[in-house]
Every structure is written in C-alpha cells, then in structure tokens.
Amino acid sequence: LTSDPLDLGHNHTLEWTAFTPDRALNPQYNGIPDIDRFGAIIRHPRSDGVGECAGGVVFESYGAILIAAVTPSAAGARWNVESWDPLTISPSVLCTACGDHGFIRAGRWINA
Ligand SMILES: [Zn+2]
C-alpha cells in the first residue's frame, strides 16, 4: 500500500507505514494479520533549522499489541488514533532526534 504523503502544514508531511512481514522468514508473525496503517513517518525540518529530519510513530492497535508481545525488543510507545480522517492522534509527537514537538489534530501539525 502506497500513497502520497499527507501535508500536515508547517512543512510537516506524514507517510503511513505498514506491517507486512515476510512470514516465511518471520514465522513468529504467522497469527498476526497485515496492518495497512501500522504507524507513520513524519518528515519535518530540524528544529535547529538545519536540514530535514524524520520521526516515527506506531498506532495503538490489537495487532501492535500482539507484535510487541512476540518482539519485545521492538515494543515502544504507541499513539492513540482518535480519528483516521482527518487524522488526530494523542499524545503529542516529540522527535527524539531533533526535539521537534507538536500535535497532529484534524490532519494538521500544531507546534507544541
Ligand atoms: Zn526531528
């Protein structure tokens, strides 16, 4: 599944990430279905203004809970999806690489 990035405004764009493992190589995922909107990559200007950066989020879902259970090393924070279209997630998104911080509400980036 591919699609154009969503323009969130403030020079932030969002691309969905999917969970589509090769189950022949990763049989631990045999009981877990593919997830089209597993999470997202959020591309943005670095908070210091020098260059581009990207951060990722994983959405809370039953599938994500199952994946975390079989791959504890991959388990991390998960975001609640309050609305898919337009997209609203909680809590806020903080980029650990550059410190960019904001909210995604009603399909728009809102600086924190
Ligand atoms: Zn960043």
Image (cartoon, rainbow, N blue to C red):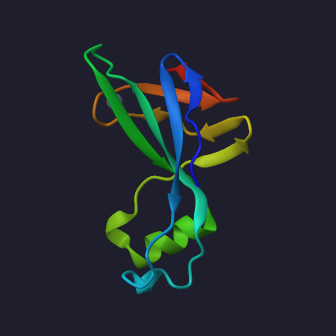
Q: Nearer the viewer, residue 13 or 71?
A: 13
Q: Position of residue 14 (x, y in %)?
A: 52, 35
- Residue 44's place in the image compared with 88, above or below, is above
Residue 96, picture quadrant: top left
Q: Position of residue 76 (x, y in %)?
A: 40, 57
Residue at 46 percent of width and 35 percent of height: 42
Any part of residue 60 in sight: no
Any part of residue 11 in sight: yes
- Residue 57's place in the image compared with 48, above or below, is below
- Residue 33's place in the image compared with 9, above or below, is below
Q: Position of residue 27 (x, y in %)?
A: 42, 86
Residue at 62 percent of width and 40 percent of height: 89
Q: Position of residue 47 (x, y in %)?
A: 33, 19
Q: In the displayed structure, does residue 26 sit left or right of residue 34?
A: left
Looking at the rendered image, the quarter that the N terminus falls into is: bottom right
Residue 63, picture quadrant: bottom right
Q: In the displayed structure, does residue 93 sit left or right of residue 45?
A: right
Residue at 39 percent of width and 39 percent of height: 55
Q: In the displayed structure, does residue 102 sit left or right of residue 8?
A: left
- The total number of labels drawn is 0
Residue at 25 percent of width and 16 percent of height: 50
Q: Residue furthest top?
A: 49
Q: Nearer the viewer, residue 66 or 38?
A: 38
Q: Where ligand 1 lies, by image quadrant?
A: top left
